[in-house]
Amino acid sequence: MSSSTPLVRRDLPHLLTPLPGPRAQAIIARDQKVLSPSYTRSYPLVADHGEGAIIEDPDGNRFLDFNAGIAVASTGHCHPEVVDAIQRQAARLIHMSGTDFYYENMVELAEKLAASAPGPGPWRVYFGNSGTEAVEAAMKLARYHTGREKFIAFYGSFHGRTMGSLSLTASKVVQRRGFGTLLPGVYHAPYPNPYRQPGEDGTCSVRWIEEQLFRTVLAPEDVAAIFVEPVQGEGGYIVPPPAFLRELRALADRHGILLVFDEVQCGMGRTGRLWAASHFGVTPDIFTTAKGLASGLPLSACIAKADIMQWRPGAHASTFGGNPVAVESALVTLSLVQRELAANAGRVGAHILERLRTWPVRFPNVGDVRGLGLMIGIELVKDQSTKERAPEVRDLLEQMAFERGLLVLGAGANTIRLCPPLILTEGQADFALDTLEECLQNLTR
Ligand code: PLP
């Protein structure tokens, strides 16, 4: 290489055109004529191909992806071992309907998931295609097993958009507006947020259920299950105080209520451990996984204690759930996550959090930084003393980062979420943080 050739690192962003470039613009114009306008696009990124934590658009611009397809591309984009497994399986058997017939890799994945569950088994596994399907399965199973009808979920939670899971979701009103009456008998309680309730150890949310809900509007013996995200995702990447899930477990046990952990976003190594539940030492009765499970192929699982998952043949099933190609991808993903990627998420996540720790002191718009592993939130405020939320600052930051080749998205009203692929290197993490620091400095100028 001649000394005048600039060194372009393939693991970092590189922009060639103003954004969006001409090819991206043409695709966006076609998209806008034909795709459902219900999709939320925060900035005009068109993905053409990806490798690791890098996405390249059709104009040759390279971006560092701190979204991972919203916590899905756990092993990075097109991990060679995942691609190889998908290609081999696609040439062997693409579909057979696991609800009606048997095939070995579905059994193998169920065995491995059951063996990895956060607590003593035995466990059984039901496969679906998406997070919402895993949650629907958990809702139906909880009703079937307990003979009870009602549910408790938390404000800020996101459990999906089909009618059952949407009834649990209490994230943004736009997700419910216009859709009429949802499932009756769903009650919501506050999710503990250490930044907004300093000093509170999380037990007040549990006391609120016992002392408010159970004394006024909801008989505990009518409740089938409590659904909770061990780390709240769409609601703003909120890590609850350790006592919260322990106390919730005790409350559920006192009243014969099932405890369901929705690990669709926080599971599969994202928090530095395979399941977020294991940070808190609490075992659920049922848990769900989806997003990162198959590195981008559609696959979800609802995993329950074996004595709970006792429903009759025909009670619940899905044509595509447990598709052999998605399952093969998940087998490789699970092995990579258990072997090295959860540990990498823990290590690189700790490095990011260490650097972020000074931000609330250095940047007046940064109210709070928090996270576990590579599930990290940066909360933007107008004023640090009042903690007034600043959604417009968050949106601007998202846009400024995009213009510098860094892909980040929001969560909740005013939080930037960092959920890069679990293969992220420290060098890539530092690039992203340098970029965000530069954006924050420009904001205050
Ligand atoms: N549960 C949680 C915790 C989620 O974050 C999501 C999606 O963001 C879902 C469920 C729904 O998953 P899907 O979009 O695959 O239906």
Image: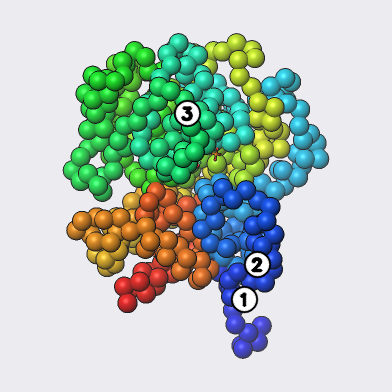
Q: Residue sitting at 72 percent across and 47 percent down?
A: 84
Q: Which mark is residue 182?
A: 3
Dot 2: element: helix
Amino acid at dot 1: Leu
* Label 3 C-beta lies within 8 Å of the nearest ligand 1 atom: no
Dot 1: element: loop
Q: Residue sitting at 58 percent across and 71 percent down?
A: 19
User: Is 408 drawn above or below residue 300 in the view shown?
Assistant: below
Left or right, residue 43 beside residue 327? left
Amino acid at dot 3: Leu
Residue 138 location, x and y as percent?
A: 50, 24
Q: Residue sitting at 25 percent across and 47 percent down?
A: 196
User: Is 109 drawn above or below residue 174 in the view shown?
Assistant: above
Q: Between residues 236 and 322, which one lies in front from this camera angle? A: 236
CA–CA distance between discs 3 and 2?
A: 38 Å
CA–CA distance between discs 2 and 1?
A: 15 Å
* Residue lying at the far right of the rendered structure: 91
Q: If you read the primary sequence from the N terminus, does the residue marked by circle 1 or circle 3 appear first? A: 1
* Label 2 C-beta lies within 8 Å of the nearest ligand 1 atom: no
Q: Looking at the image, do the residues carrying marks 3 and 2 touch, with CB atoms under 8 Å apart?
A: no
Q: If you read the primary sequence from the N terminus, does the residue marked by circle 3 or circle 2 appear first? A: 2
Q: Is the residue marked by circle 3 packed among few (<14), some (14-19), or many (20+) residues within 10 Å?
A: some
Q: Which mark is residue 16?
A: 1
Q: If you read the primary sequence from the N terminus, does the residue marked by circle 2 or circle 1 appear first? A: 1
- Label 1 or label 3, whichever lies nearer to me, is 3
Q: Which mark is residue 25?
A: 2
The N terminus, quarter of image: bottom right
Q: Residue sitting at 69 percent across and 66 percent down?
A: 26
Amino acid at dot 2: Gln
The C terminus, quarter of image: bottom left
